[in-house]
Image (cartoon, helix red, strand yellow):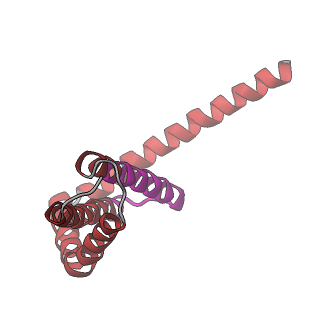
Amino acid sequence: MILSMSHQTIIFLATVLLGVLTGFAYDLLRVFRRIIRHNKIAMHFEDCVFWISAAIFIFFFLLTHNFGEVRIFAIVGVLLGMLLYFIIASPLFMRLAVGFVSIVLGGYQRKIEKVLSKMRKYVKMKNSSLQNQMKIIRNKE
């Protein structure tokens, strides 16, 4: 479908804004990671879930506003918005957010980490007992 130049400009500016919002959402994930320590597997899983979700959201945006046509200017708009956000706003936001959260949480951070550690141990324990039960079942067959 042929779009007017003004409609393409609006779509481009909207995708730039979408890129900025995607960068901001990723920074929220980064703040969460600084508050609660993650291992590499959890970080990779979170990244995969985040980027797949972001791609689906961006695709649905293009589907509803650009008649489902993925055009190069829309992709460039999203990438440009993310790049601008990460260069201009991200360093300041990260400093402010991490500082704010550390002030608000204060002494609670260690308690939260202890609770999460206990949850991890419980899940590992349940997982190992489930694996032992599966071994018993396999051996009986």
Q: Which residues are magenta?
A: 32-58
Across and down, in percent, residue 38 comes to 44, 59
**Outermost residue, front side:** 2
Query: Residue 46 colored magenta?
Result: yes
Residue drawn at 71 percent across, 30 percent down: 132
Residue 20, given in percent of the width and then of the height, sits at: 23, 66
**Which residue is at 37% across, 48% downward?**
56
* Main SS of residues in magenta: helix
Residue 29 in percent (x, y) is at 32, 59
Q: Nearer the viewer, residue 105 or 5?
A: 5
Residue 69 in the image: above or below residue 127:
below
Furthest residue in direction bottom, as rendered: 87
Residue 18 relative to residue 41: left or right:
left
Report if residue 127 lies within the magenta region: no
The one nearer the camera, 5 or 118, is: 5
Q: Relative to 67, is 15 above or below?
A: below
Q: How many marks?
A: 0
Percent coordinates x, y for residue 28 in the rendering: 27, 60
Assign the C terminus to one quadrant of the image: top right
Residue closest to the eye, 139 or 46: 46
Residue, x 72% and y 27% (percent of image)?
134
Most foreground residue, 75 or 104: 75
Q: In percent of the image, x 28 and y 57: which residue is there?
A: 109
